[in-house]
Image: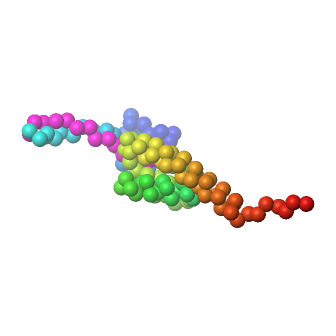
C-alpha cells in the first residue's frame, strides 16, 4: 500500500484524520445572527501547521515575540532543529505573521548593522602606520 491513503479503501487520508500531522482543517460556514437578528452566514478558516526557518538568534527571538503578540503558540517537534519553529494558525494569520516578520527583520538587520559598525569603530584601533 502506498503512503497515500485512498478513500475508496475506507482508510481516511490526512485531509480527513485530525490526528494526522498533515491534517488541514477545512474552511467551514457558520450560521449566526447580525445586530438586527437576521440570519447571516460567516466563513471560518481552518488552521494548519506551518514550519518556519528564521535564521539567526535575533530572528528567532523576533519571530517568537511576534507569534506571542498575536496569541499564537510557537512550538518544535522532537528532534527538530533549534532554528525551526512550528505554528498552528489559519492561512490569513500565517500570511500576516510572515509579512510582518520580514518587515521587522529588515529593520532589525539594519539596526544591528549600525550598532556593530559603531562598536567596531569605537573599540578596534587601526594598525599603526610604519
Range covered by the magenta-colored residues: 37-50
Q: Position of residue 107 (x, y in %)?
A: 53, 49
Horizontal side, residue 68 vs residue 33: left or right: right
Q: Of residues 1 and 103, which is closer to you in this image? A: 103
Q: Of residues 92 and 121, which is closer to you in this image? A: 121
Q: Position of residue 121 (x, y in %)?
A: 70, 59
Q: Is residue 46 visible?
A: yes
Residue drawn at (39%, 34%) of the image: 8
Q: Is residue 84 visible?
A: no
> Based on the displayed image, in which of its 4 quarters is residue 82 positioned?
bottom right
Colouring scheme applied when the structure was drawn: rainbow
Relative vertical location of residue 60 with respect to residue 103 in this rendering, above or below: below
Q: Position of residue 93 (x, y in %)?
A: 38, 45
- Is 62 inside the magenta-drawn segment? no
Report how many numbered discs are placed on residues in the image. Answer: 0
Q: Residue furthest front?
A: 129
Image quarter of the C terminus: bottom right
Q: Position of residue 125 (x, y in %)?
A: 76, 63
Q: Of residues 112 and 99, which is closer to you in this image? A: 112
Relative vertical location of residue 87 with respect to residue 44 in this rendering, above or below: below
Residue drawn at (61%, 58%) of the image: 115
- Is 41 inside the magenta-drawn segment? yes
Q: Residue furthest right?
A: 130
Relative vertical location of residue 75 with respect to residue 10 in this rendering, above or below: below
Q: Main secondary structure of the magenta part?
A: strand
Residue drawn at (62%, 53%) of the image: 113
Residue drawn at (51%, 39%) of the image: 2
Horizontal side, residue 84 vs residue 41: left or right: right
Amino acid at each position: 500500500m502506498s503512503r497515500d491513503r485512498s478513500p475508496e479503501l475506507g482508510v481516511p487520508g490526512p485531509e480527513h484524520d485530525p490526528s494526522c500531522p498533515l491534517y488541514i482543517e477545512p474552511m467551514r460556514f457558520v450560521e449566526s445572527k447580525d445586530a438586527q437578528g437576521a440570519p447571516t452566514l460567516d466563513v471560518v478558516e481552518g488552521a494548519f501547521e506551518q514550519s518556519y526557518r528564521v535564521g539567526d538568534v535575533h530572528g528567532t527571538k523576533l519571530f517568537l515575540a511576534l507569534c506571542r503578540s498575536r496569541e499564537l503558540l510557537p512550538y518544535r517537534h522532537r528532534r527538530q532543529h533549534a532554528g525551526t519553529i512550528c505554528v498552528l494558525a489559519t492561512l490569513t494569520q500565517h500570511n500576516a505573521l510572515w509579512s510582518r516578520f520580514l518587515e521587522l527583520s529588515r529593520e532589525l538587520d539594519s539596526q544591528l548593522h549600525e550598532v556593530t559598525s559603531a562598536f567596531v569603530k569605537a573599540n578596534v584601533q587601526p594598525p599603526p602606520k610604519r
